[in-house]
Image (cartoon, rainbow, N blue to C red):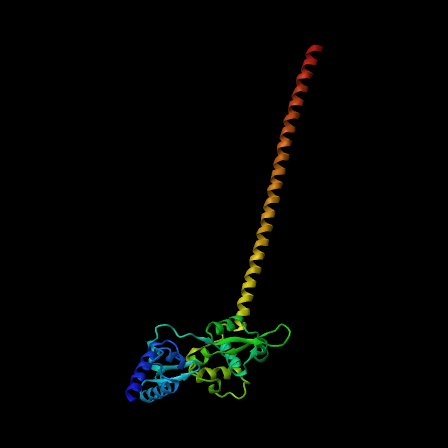
Amino acid sequence: MKKEINQLVRILEGALFASEHPLSIDRMQSLFDEVETPDKKTIHEALEQLVGEYSDRGVELKELASGFQFQVKADLAKWVQRLQEDKTPRYSRALLETLVLIAYRQPITRGEIEEIRGVTVNSNIIKTLMEREWVKEVGYRDLPGKPALLATTKAFLDYFGLKRLDELPPLSEIQDLDKAGEALAMQLKLEDQITSETDSIEDFQAKEKSSDDSLDQADTNQEDSKAQLSDEIDTEEINIEQGDFEEQENELIETLDESQTDRIHENRKITESAG
């Protein structure tokens, strides 16, 4: 029996290290043929043995919301993080405040978040949280417009090393959201990922205003160009009309000169005849 448990421990240890995601008990059972599938009690015993074997090691076996997973111990994060080639994602204070409200007040609507924060929630914040699979829609509030209810997911708990929501850092009253966001970030090991509120609604509105100003300037330049072009066309028409007038004037002068010449010739003929 002990030999079978030891073999089961080795199998589960290898599977847990090989898997990118937490493994549930059911998923562990699926690793075996139907005949040799261990019962859940036996698997729990093997997992408890693994927990004990890794108690003094650099990694630990933790039970998360969606299963069991080996994780580097928190006190080693300072050194292990230096192995990461990719830059750690950085999150704005606005995003953290929104995440705090969803985590502690769920289910909650976007309008209720905006009412508490006092500013509009940037659509990109909700989009980012959903793309990370930290937040999902779990229903609709029975209000006009049927606003969606937002709540956290198992992926959220897994990412922050939690099994249940009641393991969240205690924040009895969320009054100062700036401090609440920082507290959540620090207690959930995100202290190095806080940035200034670069994607806050104020910055978004500033960028939007800048874009509007650019469009207004473009419209002004276009109107100026139209006015300048109109002036050039009017000037050209005046020049054309003036040119036509000068041409007609020259033709008239030539006609008058010809008429005057004819008269001089005619007067000479009359004078010659009289003589």
Query: Which one is nearer the viewer's eye here, 231 or 86?
Result: 86
Instruction: Point out the residue furthest to the right here.
Output: 274
- At 49% from the left edge and 82% from the top edge, which residue is drawn? 181
Quarter occupied by the C terminus: top right
Image spot of residue 62 (x, y percent): 38, 84
For residue 24, say whether it is visible. no
Q: Position of residue 20 (x, y in %)?
A: 37, 76
**40 or 136: nearer the eye?**
40
189 over 274 or under it: above or below: below
Give the tally of numbered discs. 0
Q: In this picture, is 145 found above or below 227?
A: below
Q: Quadrant of residue 64?
A: bottom left
Q: Nearer the viewer, residue 37 or 265?
A: 37
Horizontal relation, residue 50 to residue 198: left or right: left
Name which quarter of the figure residue 19 lies in: bottom left
Please state the horizontal and vertical placement of residue 89, each as a whole percent of the image.
42, 74
| Pick the front one: 265 or 227 | 227
